[in-house]
Image (spheres, grey):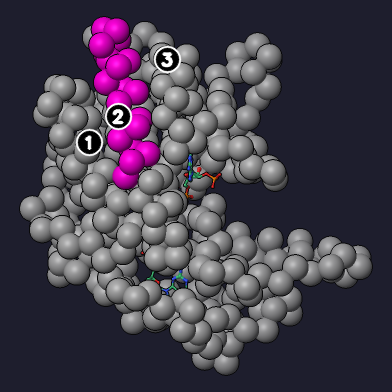
């Protein structure tokens, strides 16, 4: 029997995927609760379009302060929200940064998931049926050569990937030990105009469009030879939801099945801007990883057959969407600069 008032709890709701998923679930009539960590600046920008004051009639989005490092806050939020579905998307999700902050990454990504699973186990004992989605990553395949599917051995290559693998196995163990409805999504890279600006795709589209408008001169990158299976985040959050609507919990790879190098992404994005990237891009070893994942290309036959999932946005459309969006942002920045506002340098990030 479908839940008459489906209620979802999303950790990581302020991130790229969290914002797309919240929109999707609200459009399906869900009440949506999200975990937000306290910051000294606003970190809910991606939710601006859907946020309504909870005092307003008909508001269906509720935000709660919490942190994956704080099990007590997670237990309280789960008990207060009474969710029928939980999507665990919160993570220190930057692979390069995970080498600099290995213990923190492991705590949030791996032990944080365990804390939430413990909260869910307690909540499920109250008799309320609940379904749980764990945000796994193609980084868990790491050095295993493509194509990668559910049967491919894991070989993680960063503290982030090792943390995600631990979370994957915690989720599997809780599914088996306590008969909870828990699914592991193993998602390949997915991007959008909301992607964090230190991930390579957005770093490229942000920089090239700023270079085009004279706001920046150079773009510093690391390894251009690695290849990724890049899809569109809006398509990928649909797969998360589909996984939780199945009769049985299972694990699924979600990917486009097409892989491109960073160099190819750069070339297509620069072409759209009318730039020759070779005149603007320099390499900086600070963006290299001690151990790299060279090639990812997913085989998502199982998700396509069982869930009926299929990606809608092509690689070329994704690049064009991101470039066009960032060109508009750069135009706004230039207007401000022409009015005398200081142009912010974006070259010092660790991404
Ligand atoms: P993202 O944009 O980096 O968002 C991460 C979210 O986690 C943000 O809301 C962030 O909050 C939150 N967060 C970080 N540390 C936290 C903590 N200690 N406690 C509570 N919340 C915390 O990542 P994304 O691209 O949306 O990815 C969503 C999930 O899927 C992540 O788990 C990621 O590892 C995984 N994944 C992503 C991809 C991809 O290609 N995008 C592929 C496979 C798996 P702030 O906004 O405050 O930073
Ligand atoms: N970030 C970044 N910055 N990456 C660079 C740069 C740079 O300046 N130059 C080259 N790259 C290369 C990286 O070495 C990597 O091979 C590739 O670009 C993609 O890097 P990211 O965009 O940072 O993503 P990722 O593949 O490491 O990780 C993303 O996808 C995973 C799924 O496979 C993240 O979203 C992870 O959270 C996610 O699990």
Q: Earlier in the sequence, mark 2 or mark 1?
A: 2
State yes or no: discs 2 and 1 in contact (Cβ < 8 Å). Answer: yes
State the image coordinates of residue 228 (x, y, percent, origin top left).
31, 67
The answer to whether 24 appears left or right of 328 in the picture is left
SS state under label 3: helix
Q: Residue 79, labelled with which disc?
A: 3
Determine the main secondary structure of the stretch shown in magenta: helix
**For this rendering, which residue is in front, 88 or 194?**
88
The answer to whether 106 appears left or right of 11 in the picture is left
Above or below for 20 versus 283: above
Q: Among all residues in the image, which is located at the extreme left?
A: 151
Q: Among all residues in the image, which is located at the extreme bottom?
A: 279
Q: CA distance from mark 2 to mark 3?
A: 13 Å
Above or below for 68 versus 281: above
Number of other residues with Cα within 10 Å of mark 1, as a class: few under 14, some 14 to 19, many 20 or more: many
Q: Residue 171, labelled with which disc?
A: 1
SS state under label 1: helix
Above or below for 51 versus 251: above
Q: CA distance from mark 3 to mark 1?
A: 20 Å
Using the rendered image of the protein, determine whether residue 2 is visible from the camera's viewpoint.
no
Q: How many marks?
A: 3
């Amino acid at each position: 029997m479908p839940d008459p008032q489906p209620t979802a709890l999303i950790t990581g709701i302020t991130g790229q995927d969290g914002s797309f998923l919240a929109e999707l679930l609200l459009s399906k009539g869900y009440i949506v609760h999200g975990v937000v960590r306290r910051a000294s600046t606003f970190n809910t920008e991606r939710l601006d379009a859907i946020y309504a004051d909870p005092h307003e009639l008909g508001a269906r989005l509720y935000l709660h302060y919490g942190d994956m490092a704080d099990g007590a806050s997670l237990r309280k939020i789960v008990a207060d929200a009474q969710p029928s579905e939980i999507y665990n998307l919160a993570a220190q999700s930057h692979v390069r940064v995970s080498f600099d902050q290995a213990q923190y990454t492991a705590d949030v990504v791996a032990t944080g998931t365990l804390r939430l699973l413990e909260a869910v186990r307690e909540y499920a004992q109250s008799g309320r049926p609940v379904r749980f989605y764990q945000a796994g990553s193609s980084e868990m395949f790491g050095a295993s050569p493509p194509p990668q599917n559910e049967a491919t051995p894991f070989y993680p290559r960063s503290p982030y990937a090792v943390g995600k693998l631990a979370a994957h196995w915690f989720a599997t163990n809780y599914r088996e030990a306590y008969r909870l409805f828990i699914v592991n999504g193993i998602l390949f890279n997915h991007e959008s105009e909301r992607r964090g600006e230190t991930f390579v795709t957005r770093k490229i589209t942000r920089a090239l469009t700023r270079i085009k408008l004279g706001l920046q001169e150079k773009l510093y990158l690391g390894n251009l030879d690695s290849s990724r299976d890049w899809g569109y985040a809006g398509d990928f959050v649909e797969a998360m939801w589909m996984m939780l609507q199945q009769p049985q919990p299972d694990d699924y790879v979600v990917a486009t099945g097409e892989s491109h190098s960073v160099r190819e992404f750069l070339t297509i994005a620069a072409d759209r801007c009318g730039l020759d990237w070779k005149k603007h891009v320099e390499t900086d070893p600070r963006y290299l990883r001690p151990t790299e994942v060279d090639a990812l290309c997913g085989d998502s036959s199982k998700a396509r057959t069982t869930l009926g999932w299929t990606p809608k946005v092509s690689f070329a459309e994704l690049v064009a969407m991101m470039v066009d969006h960032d060109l508009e942002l750069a135009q706004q920045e230039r207007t401000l600069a022409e009015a005398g506002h200081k142009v912010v340098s974006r070259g010092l990030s660790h991404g």
